[in-house]
Image: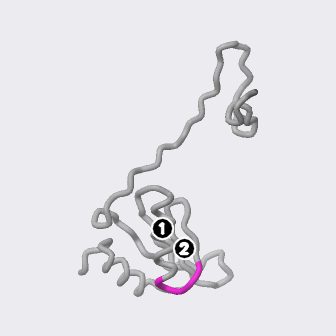
């Protein structure tokens, strides 16, 4: 019985047919970057309302680390602000204008040096 990973044709859509008996499709697994400590992260906080029907969204970019750590930080920030949002592709989206509050929270957590 073939393993599911070897038989997953959707993962191989861009592969050209091979007649070799020894051919084995190698998956290009993307390596996740190791999460930097909070003091070494260079996060940027921005307000965005383009293509959002005029609604404001605070975006935190520049996170370097694993997707799980990004989601953990996103969940923490959303709970501190009491709003919804999402965390994916290296960005944390927080619904509403929370730039000042997020900056205070991140400074307390060690992500920024107070200036």
Q: Quadrant of the C terminus?
A: bottom left
Where is residue 67 drawn, in percent x and y? 50, 58
Q: Which residue is mark 1?
A: 72
Q: Is residue 75 left or right of residue 13?
A: left
Name the one closer to the observer, 95 or 80: 80
Which residues, given as a range, are shown in magenta?
80-84
Name the side, left or right, on which 102 lies relative to 18: left
Q: Is residue 11 magenta?
A: no
Q: Residues within 10 Å of mark 2 (few under 14, many from 20)?
A: many
Residue found at x 39% / y 51%: 34
* Crowd class of label 1 (few under 14; some 14 to 19; many from 20; radius 10 Å): few
User: Please, which colouring scheme is shown?
Assistant: one colour
Q: CA distance from mark 2 to mark 1?
A: 13 Å
Q: Secondary structure at mark 1?
A: helix
Which badge, 2 or 1, is on the more N-terminal residue?
1
Quarter holding residue 3: top right
Q: Which quarter of the image is occupied by the N terminus?
A: top right
Query: Which residue is identified by label 2?
Result: 93
Predominant secondary structure, magenta span = loop
Quarter of image, res 43: bottom left
Residue 112 x/y as whole percent: 30, 74
């Amino acid at each position: 019985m073939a393993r599911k990973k070897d038989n997953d044709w959707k993962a191989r859509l861009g592969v050209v047919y091979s007649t070799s008996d020894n051919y084995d499709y190698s998956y290009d697994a993307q390596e996740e970057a190791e999460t930097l400590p909070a003091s070494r992260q260079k996060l940027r906080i921005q307000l965005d309302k383009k293509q959002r029907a005029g609604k404001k969204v605070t975006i935190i970019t520049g996170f370097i680390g694993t997707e799980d750590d990004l989601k953990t930080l996103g969940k923490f920030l959303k709970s501190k602000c009491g709003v919804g949002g999402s965390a994916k592709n290296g960005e944390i989206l927080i619904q509403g204008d929370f730039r000042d509050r997020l900056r205070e929270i991140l400074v307390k957590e060690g992500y920024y040096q107070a200036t």
